[in-house]
Image (cartoon, rainbow, N blue to C red):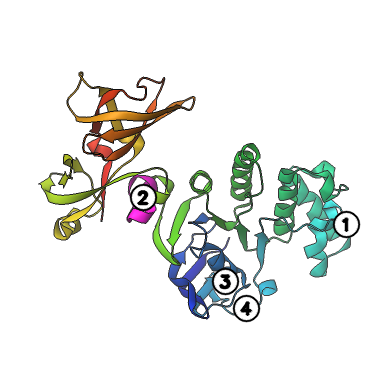
Amino acid sequence: MTKLAIRALAKRFEAFTAVENVDLETGEGEFVSLLGPSGCGKTTTLRCVAGLEDPTSGTILFDDVDVTHLAPERRSIGMVFQNYALFPHMTVAENVGFGLMMRGIRGAPAASRIASVLDMVQLSNAQDRYPRQMSGGQQQRVALARALVFEPKLLLLDEPLANLDAKLRDEMRFFIRSLQQRVGITTLYVTHDQAEAMAMSDRIVVMFGGRIHQVGGAQDIYHRPTTKEVAGFIGQANLFAADVKGRDGDLLLLRTPFGEFRARSGDPEAALSAGAGSLMVRPEAVRLAPAAAAAGLSATVEEAHFLGNIVDYKLRLADGTPVAAQAIGDLDHTPGTQVSVSFDENRSWLVL
């Protein structure tokens, strides 16, 4: 298994900076996702790792070996693209074996590897079929088999599920993750889909404007974002301007335009020094009660959407501030209803 290290990576296209000062290290066999909106630099970073783009500056290491300017075919990487890139005139077995043939591996050794990897992706009975005879999910598995058949050091995937429908995309998430864990290959995965990254990754790298904003596990990034951009991109988030007034044990005392609250922080001393930030409250940390039943902020339900296992609410506080809330169960509060709103302070977070 291979460790990947990216150090001070930058890539500029004339006056445009696509990637700036990216530093990242993976563990052996780790699944790391590059997550962010379109144009954030995640695909450019992946292409630099693959050798398809030459970095403007910085270093890329595979197991402490500098591969920054090494040709792609000499890096021992497997790559899967959004469009699969299968040859329509070749059978499944021929597509999978193409990379082996280009490396001079033919005959029985090639046939053995092809059979083994097709069994791995559950396509043993499809080796004589053509891409046009297969579903999108099956074609994606062929692309995975082709990337893995020559036993690469690193697997790179660039939005591989973007062209699949929602149900198949969910199935393939778990298939790819399970396959990666069985093979044990270090994997770098590019996606703009937060649910995809959270479901599959050991760690997530969140990027904006060519820079890394946060690296961490799914729960850490969701519950403890380090920037407003991360908080707003990962899931839904209520963000309220807040002044830091003091400290109460592990909690900070905050003042907002509509009331005083307590919240947690990754660095209370830095928060006290800064004096202000943004109070982040996820919709599921917003508590609702009938207006007459509890003390809290007065709000009006503007929208209520029953989604089966949860209900999404759009609320408006008395001062006009919008609040998103989410509750498990039935539709208890209809539009126009007055409710009392409170925040779970143990799940409220101050973003600096």
First of labels 3, 4 by sequence position: 3
Q: CA distance from mark 3 to mark 1?
A: 30 Å
Report the residue marked by disc 2: 231
Q: Residue at x 62, y 59 (%)?
A: 155
Secondary structure under the numbered disc 4 in the rendered image: loop
Amino acid type at image mark 3: Cys
Tell me: 51 left or right of 326.
right
**Label 2 Cα neighbours within 10 Å, binned few <14 / some 14-19 / many ≥20:** many
Camera-near label (4 vs 1) is: 1
Q: CA distance from mark 2 to mark 1?
A: 47 Å
Q: Circles 3 and 1: CB distance less than 8 Å?
A: no
Report the residue marked by disc 1: 89
Task: Kindly identify which numbered label has been placed on residue 48.
Answer: 3
Amino acid type at image mark 4: Leu
Secondary structure under the numbered disc 2 in the rendered image: helix
First of labels 3, 1 by sequence position: 3
The answer to whether residue 283 is magenta is: no
First of labels 4, 2 by sequence position: 4
Q: CA distance from mark 3 to mark 4?
A: 10 Å
**The N terminus: image quadrant:** bottom right
The answer to whether residue 228 is magenta is: yes
First of labels 2, 1 by sequence position: 1
Q: Nearer the viewer, residue 184 or 58?
A: 58
Q: CA distance from mark 4 to mark 2?
A: 37 Å
Report the residue marked by disc 4: 70
Q: Residue at x 63, y 36 (%)?
A: 167
First of labels 4, 1 by sequence position: 4
Camera-near label (3 vs 4) is: 3
Tell me: 90 left or right of 119.
right
**Label 3 Cα neighbours within 10 Å, binned few <14 / some 14-19 / many ≥20:** many
Q: What secondary structure is the magenta-colored segment mainly?
A: helix
Region in magenta: 220-230
